[in-house]
Image (cartoon, rainbow, N blue to C red):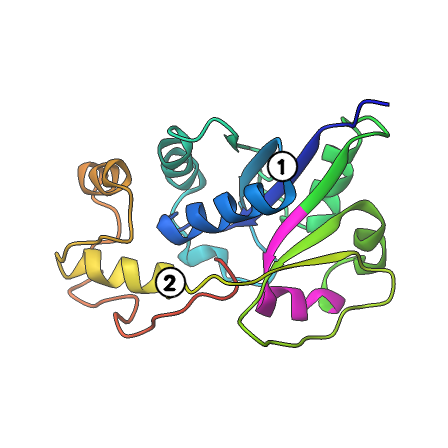
């Protein structure tokens, strides 16, 4: 029997999307032989203050620009809207579109995975997807009973969106960003200081939650 489609959801605020996000997705695609990876910007993430987020449309547009060179990377509006961006709701809507033969994966950082049991309706989440967990070398973490997990090791990508935003505010170069994304940011005046104050520290250098 011909295998079904292997699809992976990659959620996050993507504020902004950067090269580490793309490199992680490439590694997951290669490791799991994925047919598509959907980049799903969160409109109103339950574990983050959405009042400080760049608008959904700007973040979605940056994802579109970043994904353009990658045929298997698909920008998605699955979590667009005013409601909370609960993973269970996203998975239920997307799973309903797939056939029984299709495999659904969820790409996530190890720190976020460690919080899984705090998620809304988390036991049901386990039934709908398999997890690809970006893991630090030698790292261990709790895996809830019933969770299907594939570790994605060997990635050393010390990039954080907070660091990128701070560098943009200071007028510095950002090799962590695709050139076309930085051009969009500059053209739209994103991440500039508010009342002369930075909203992020340039010193943070890791983003394990992939936000």
Report crowding for label 2: few under 14, some 14 to 19, many 20 or more residues within 10 A (C-alpha): many
Which of 45 and 39 lies nearest the eye of the viewer? 39
Outermost residue, top side = 2
Mark closer to the observer (2, 1): 1
Q: Is residue 111 magenta?
A: yes
Q: Residue at x 42, y 65 (%)?
A: 156
Q: Which mark is residue 164?
A: none
Residue 29 lies left or right of residue 69; in this view the side is right
For residue 204, which quarter of the picture?
bottom left
Residue hosting label 2: 160
Numbered disc 2: secondary structure: loop
Residue 63 lies left or right of residue 35; in this view the side is left
Placement of 79 over or under 207, stated as above or below: above
For residue 22, which quarter of the picture?
top left
Q: Residue at x 68, y 50 (%)?
A: 86
Residue 18 visible to an observer of this rendering: no
Placement of 28 over or under 61, stated as above or below: below
Contact between labelled residues 1 and 2, with CB atoms less than 8 Å apart: no
Q: Residue at x 57, y 37 (%)?
A: 37
Q: Residue at x 58, y 76 (%)?
A: 138
- What's drawn in magenta, residue-wise? 106-117
The tag earlier along the polypeptide, 2 or 1, is 1
Placement of 161 over or under 77, stated as above or below: below
Residue 177 lies left or right of residue 186; in this view the side is right
Quadrant where the image shows the N terminus: top right
Which of 90 and 210 lies nearest the eye of the viewer? 210
Residue hosting label 1: 34
Numbered disc 1: secondary structure: loop
**Residue 144, horizontal then vertical, whole percent:** 81, 68
């Amino acid at each position: 029997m011909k295998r079904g489609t292997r699809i992976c959801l990659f959620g996050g605020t993507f504020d902004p999307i950067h090269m580490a996000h793309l490199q992680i997705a490439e590694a997951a695609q290669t490791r799991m032989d994925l047919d598509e990876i959907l980049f799903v910007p969160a409109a109103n993430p339950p574990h983050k203050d959405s009042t400080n987020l760049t608008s959904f449309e700007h973040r979605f547009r940056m994802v579109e620009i970043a994904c353009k060179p990658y045929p298997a990377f698909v920008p998605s509006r699955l979590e667009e809207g005013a409601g909370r961006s609960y993973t269970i709701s996203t998975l239920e809507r997307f799973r309903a579109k797939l056939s029984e033969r299709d495999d659904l994966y969820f790409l996530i950082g190890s720190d976020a995975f460690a919080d899984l049991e705090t998620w809304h309706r988390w036991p049901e989440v386990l039934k709908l997807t398999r997890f690809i967990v970006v893991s630090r070398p030698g790292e261990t973490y709790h895996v809830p009973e019933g969770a299907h997990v594939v570790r994605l090791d060997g990635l050393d990508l010390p990039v954080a969106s907070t660091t990128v935003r701070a560098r943009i505010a200071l007028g510095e170069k950002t090799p962590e960003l695709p050139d076309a994304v930085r051009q969009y940011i500059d053209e739209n005046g994103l991440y500039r200081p508010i009342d002369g104050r930075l909203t992020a520290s340039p010193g943070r250098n890791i983003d394990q939650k992939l936000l």
